Amino acid sequence: MLPYRYEHKVRVRYGETDQMGVCWHGNYLLYLEEARGEALRATGCGSYADLEAAGVITPIVAVNLRYHKSAVYDDVLTIRVYVDEPPRATIRFRYDVVNDADELILDGTTDLAFLSRETRQPCRPPLAMRQFFLQEAKP
């Protein structure tokens, strides 16, 4: 049942920090992308490469992030990925990023559109994805 939930762990690497050892804010988008890709794989619907092979691309059309606390070098972060509603022309991923002490580091959302790879026009999500999330939404 929705919301779909997936957890992914990343470790803050030294090269991702500033002179104070604090994780640079832009790296969180990369962490979220990695977690989102793994969350899609875990549904059994395939990877981004599979979507593209099926003729569908998924550009990000909106990002909303709120930073609550700094992550520092060598922190292990848990990224909780949620999908609250079945995908239509877009899909919204919601995130909570916490450290090992379960302190909220960041929360936010990314919205991805489904576009035909050929025409760059909006299209429906692939059938397997629609079936997975609709099945999840049924009581």
Image: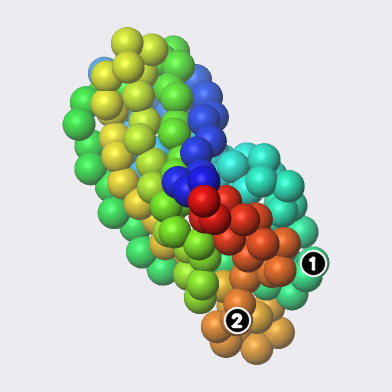
Q: Position of residue 131 (x, y in %)?
A: 67, 62
Say if residue 24 shows up in the picture.
yes
The furthest residue to the left: 68
Q: Nearer the viewer, mark 1 or mark 2?
A: 2
Q: Position of residue 49 (x, y in %)?
A: 74, 57
Q: Amino acid at mark 2?
A: Cys
**Vertical relation: 24 (above or below) 129:** above
Say if residue 30 shows up in the picture.
no
Q: Amino acid at mark 1?
A: Ala
In the picture of the structure, the residue carrying the numbered disc 1 is 53
What residue is shown at x 55% (from left), y 83% (from top)? 122
Q: Which mark is residue 123?
A: 2
Q: Secondary structure at mark 2?
A: loop
Q: Nearer the viewer, residue 23 or 8?
A: 8
Q: Nearer the viewer, residue 30 or 85?
A: 85
Q: Position of residue 42 (x, y in %)?
A: 67, 40
Q: Secondary structure at mark 1?
A: helix
**Vertical relation: 133 (above or below) 21:** below
What residue is shown at x 63% (from left), y 65% (from top)? 130
Residues at discs 1 and 2 in contact (Cβ within 8 Å): no
Q: Nearer the viewer, residue 76 or 44?
A: 44
Q: Is residue 7 left or right of residue 52?
A: left
